[in-house]
Image (tube, helix red, strand yellow):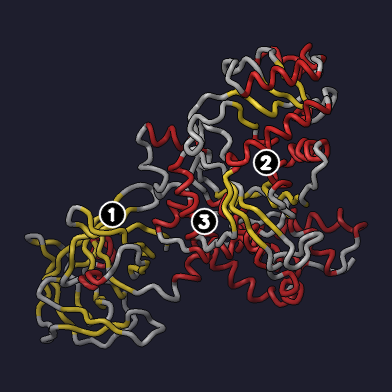
Amino acid sequence: MKDFSREIWAYALRNAIDFGKVDAGKILPKLFQHGLDKKDIRKIMPEIQKIAGEVNKLSAGEREKEFEKYGEFVKEKEEKEEGLPELEEAVEGKVVTRLAPEPSKYNHIGHALVFLIQYLYAKKYKGKCILRFDDTNPEKSALEYYRSMKEDLAWLGIKWDMEILASNDMARMYKLAEKLINQGDAFVCSCAQEDMKELRDKMKACKCRKNSKEDNLGEWKLMLSGKFKEGDRILRLKGDMKSKNGVMRDPVIFRISYSSHFIQKDKYCVWPMYDFESSVKDSLDGITHVIRSKEFELRAELHANIVKLLGMKPPIIREIGRYQITGAETQGRVIREMIEKGEIKGWDDPRLVTVKALRRRGFVPEMFQELAQTVGLSKSSGRIDPTVLAATNRKIIDQRAARYSFIADPVELEITGTPAMKEIEVLLHPDKDEKRKVKIGHEFFISKEDFENLKGKEIRLLHLYNIKLGSKVVKGKVKCEFTSSDVKDIPKINWVSFGVKARVFMPDGKWVSGVVDEGVWDLKPGAIIQFERFGFVRFDGIHNHLYEFWFAHK
């Protein structure tokens, strides 16, 4: 067997850089492109596991350096794989994809990745992307989420060609339900929920399955006219009660609900279940390709059966891996409880990975787009380390974020012997020519952390001059001396002379207070900048006379 160690190292490093941790299962398929024979799988797996373990021990910086050494061994293959892989039966100009959120929560990064993949495929084939709100659950759907989702999608850079509300198509969905009844493929059930569940578990049909078509149609019309209470009647599809796939055992396809809908109000009292609405709307809307997360895999059989029974044309469906951010909570129910208990501020709390939270912290649309390209159509689910989000975002915003100084927990300096200087010019960005003026007064502030670590030593005030730092605080100030030394190999620290009070909201939900140089006066809310030696932040605005920033990442 050929030695594949260099290729394994390269793919393991790339996988770790992209997702924070090596998934050994994703390396094996790559090796077939380099000549691995299937009969050698057992021989190669121990080496893959060994190298994956070694790569996982490396820091992010070490991984980048190592990839520079090994990357050339897979460069040609990676270049061929760049971008989204081809879609089955995709014809340029004919592809129609859809984004189908349920307006019952706020989008998190997992939703955003799937939405972007669908949109990017529509663009790739010069087709159309439809935004369809699956809003047929009146208890959960709300105008608040509907508006928020549209705002998030637009911010992500998605430009949909058409907007549809599934609830506006209730009349056609009712006709399709009646067609199933008339075909003998659906029946109205009056069984109690617990009895229905017990029978499904036992793979036994209920007595209602034997109802005549006429009786089913009559009861269906009574359901539509509001003659029954919620739960008294449901419409079920005749599936396969012996199926090992539980969703196929006479599933519910319509139910009664008198909850007021945020758009339709009280117009309807019988609502389709997700499995029915989603499958028929894809066909009614002319969707050619559906890309959805792997969690729907078990329901694919039911969706295909509904479409087949109705004689409709199904889209081509691709299930992709469900990616989550390590350590992040994404379940809407749990997040609502956390908000109600006061454990987090809201849906944009920095501890969440909702699009709103990441946007408010300073993550940019390009980060989501690049990550979507990386995830692609992989069926392997996994967790993405937060450091990967930070690394991808940093690569983008570092090129344009202006530099400023923020001093956390400030300590005041009293410096003697300084040259007469009223201001200096500093670069707004180290790679650009634009400069800004920084005023110099009698007051200087450095962080308490820098003082504790460097007291008594000669240090350089960044962009300014060298001083001998005092060793203790006397009457609220640290006495220091200007030094004319040109020594450059000494610690360089940030400082503020003319500053304004500020605070930074950190990802752990705590505030860090301090002062920021007055250059931030010109910032507009939403500006993403870098506090040198502190991290990237987004200016949130002035609140209670304080300049407030949200921390993005280092």
Judging depth in this view, the residue of 70 and 226 nearest the camera is: 226
Crowding near pointer 1: few (<14 within 10 Å), some, many (20+)?
some
Quarter holding the C terminus is bottom left
Marker disc for residue 152: none
Tell me if I can see residue 55 in this picture: no
Marker disc for residue 278: 2
Vertical relation: 352 (above or below) 514: above
Image position, residue 352 (x, y; %): 45, 47
Residue bearing the label numbered 1: 512
Locate residue 412: give its quadrant.
bottom left
Q: Amino acid at mark 1?
A: Val
Q: Amino acid at mark 2?
A: Ser
Instruction: Find numbered disc 2 in the image and state the secondary structure of the residue it sits on.
Output: helix
Crowding near pointer 3: few (<14 within 10 Å), some, many (20+)?
many
Vertical relation: 510 (above or below) 243: below
Q: Is residue 413 left or right of residue 322?
A: left
Judging depth in this view, the residue of 231 and 165 nearest the camera is: 165
**Mark 2 vs 1, N-terminal side:** 2
Image position, residue 82 (x, y; %): 70, 70
Vertical relation: 290 (above or below) 136: below
Instruction: Find numbered disc 3 in the image and state the secondary structure of the residue it sits on.
Output: helix
Q: CA distance from mark 2 to mark 1?
A: 47 Å
Q: CA distance from mark 1 to mark 3?
A: 31 Å
Image position, residue 228 (x, y; %): 60, 15
Instruction: Find numbered disc 1 in the image and state the secondary structure of the residue it sits on.
Output: strand
Q: Is residue 247 left or right of residue 266?
A: right
Judging depth in this view, the residue of 60 and 317 nearest the camera is: 317
Q: What residue is shown at x 67% (from left), y 47% (from top)? A: 293
Residue bearing the label numbered 3: 153
Disc 3 versus disc 2: nearer the observer = 2
